[in-house]
Image (cartoon, rainbow, N blue to C red):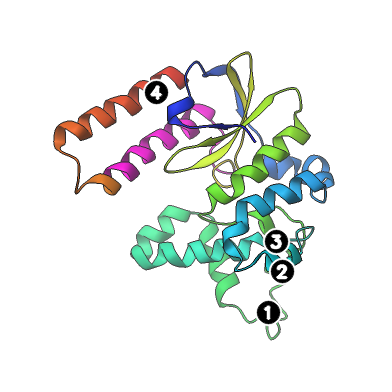
Amino acid sequence: MKKLTFETLKDITLSKEAVVYDLIRNWEKKVKPHLESADIIEALKIGFDDHFVSKEELEEYPWKEPRLDSFGAIGFSELHEIMDNETFKEYIGEDYDAYFNQLNRDWEEDEEEEEYRDWIKDQSYFAYRALNRCHHLAPFCVELGKKIKPQYEWYLFETPAHSNAIGVKNGEIHLIVDLLWGENEKNPQHLLGRMFDLSFTFLKNQTKERFTEDMFNILKQSIEDLKKQLIG
């Protein structure tokens, strides 16, 4: 699987015609037919292998009908622990009520909440959305891109803050497949720009005890230059 990072992004730019693929709208007709293919299942195993304590458990998991939202619930809990409730609710937006109900509801006793059962049914869009697990989902997004739009060369685009899949042709990004951010961010410039901006914040927090102010300024300028090269 080909990968692009800040270090290897040279000569790639964003096409003026680039779009963020609408996974929700196309899930049933264009995505779901591929979910049981060997390539898709292998990509899921690659992405989520660190969630399993053994190779046997990894292989035995029902990858044809996975519940990746349950893995995302781990990320939900981790975020909630480091944020106050209002910040947390603002951060995850429309996912808040869905995941809150998923984590706290007794499904067997509560027969009236069929609406919540529906959105997490097998092979549904929401069953694959593992909150806060973008790096784990990125290989899956790459393989989806290859199935849906094979005319592009597909890369896993990995940054410190976020990962997704990008379809490239003649050195330009034409399509972005992003299972977590793509639902609410349809503008490719904004989505990629957010990846750069949050990555600087992430790296700054990671290196604050080792970097001087001058080093932070150099890091920020380097990321800004890459951002300008990619999206203008």
Mark 3 and mark 4 lie on one chain; the one further toward the N terminus is 3
> Can you identify the residue that label 3 sits on?
119
Task: Kindly indicate whether the residue at mark 2 contacts the one at mark 3 (C-beta within 8 angstroms).
Answer: yes
Which dot, 4 or 1, sits closer to the camera?
4
Mark 2: give few (<14), some (14-19) or many (20+) Cα within 10 Å. Answer: few
The span picked out in magenta is: 183-204
When asked about the image quadrant of residue 80, the answer is bottom left
Which type of secondary structure does the marked residue at label 1 adopt?
loop
Q: CA distance from mark 3 to mark 4?
A: 38 Å
Question: Label 4 is placed on what type of residue?
Answer: Leu
**Could you say which is closer to the camera, residue 193 or residue 162?**
162
Q: Residue at x 63, y 13 (%)?
A: 170
> Can you identify the residue that label 1 sits on?
107
Mark 3: give few (<14), some (14-19) or many (20+) Cα within 10 Å. Answer: some
Classify 138 as above or below 189.
below
Q: Position of residue 215 (x, y in %)?
A: 20, 33
Q: Position of residue 128 (x, y in %)?
A: 67, 55
**Could you say which is closer to the camera, residue 231 or residue 156?**
156
Q: Residue at x 73, y 33 (%)?
A: 146
